[in-house]
Amino acid sequence: MVQRPGGQNGCVRVSAKADYAIRAAVELAASGDGPVKGDRIAQAQGIPANFLENILGDLRNAGLVASRRGADGGYWLAKPAGDVSLADVIRAVDGPLANVRGQRSEQIAYHGSAEKLRDVWVAVRASLRGVLETVTLEDLARGELPENVRALAADPDAWAPH
């Protein structure tokens, strides 16, 4: 969840699960080829080990992470890091990027003066996609964000807690 100073909740919420999942996947991307132990990922990213195991299971079920048990086992990305967007990771652990009361934006119907509100929610989802589908695990592992994301983050107003 995005928190404002003073503990106030922001409008867009990023779950702990999504945050941890992205951090774990980026750790795998930065580690290169070969298995990485869950304990190493947990320690490197400050993620509770038990929570991490569940997250890695979700990422494995989504086909983003592969694993092997045993002394030489561990986890690795099942796809090239440049082919995995942050949106892919979030969807694997939390489902759709944006919904309204648990429903997809396009499935909501409003009437009267609120009729165009659905279009606003669809636009919000498109805006999230514009960032989360363009940033890959490789981008984060290399510390190089796409130009559109750098431009958004460079705007001082983006950092204002409103």
Image (cartoon, rainbow, N blue to C red):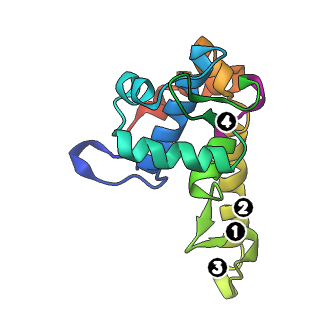
Q: Is residue 24 magenta?
A: no
Residue 81: image x %, image y %? 71, 24
Characterize the local packing of mark 3: few (<14), some (14-19) or many (20 or more) Cα atoms within 10 angstroms: few
- What amino acid type should be assigned to the residue bearing mark 1? Ser
Q: Give the range drawn in magenta.
A: 82-87
Say what secondary structure mark 3 lies in: helix
- What amino acid type should be assigned to the residue bearing mark 3? Ala
Q: Image point 64% across, 14% down: which residue?
A: 32
Q: Toward which corner of the image does residue 143 lie, by quadrant?
A: top right
Confirm or deny contact between disc 2 and disc 1 (CB under 8 A). Answer: yes
Image depth: mark 4 or mark 3 in front: 4
Q: Does the magenta stretch include residue 83?
A: yes
Nearest to the observer: residue 72 or residue 126:
72
Residue 96 can be seen in this image? yes
Nearest to the observer: residue 139 or residue 23:
23
- What amino acid type should be assigned to the residue bearing mark 2? Val
Nearest to the observer: residue 86 or residue 126:
86
- Tag 4 residue: 66
Reading the chain from its start, which is encountered first: label 2 or label 4?
4
Reading the chain from its start, which is encountered first: label 1 or label 3?
1
Say what secondary structure mark 2 lies in: helix
Characterize the local packing of mark 4: few (<14), some (14-19) or many (20 or more) Cα atoms within 10 angstroms: some
- Tag 3 residue: 114
Q: Residue furthest front?
A: 70
- Tag 1 residue: 105
Say what secondary structure mark 1 lies in: helix
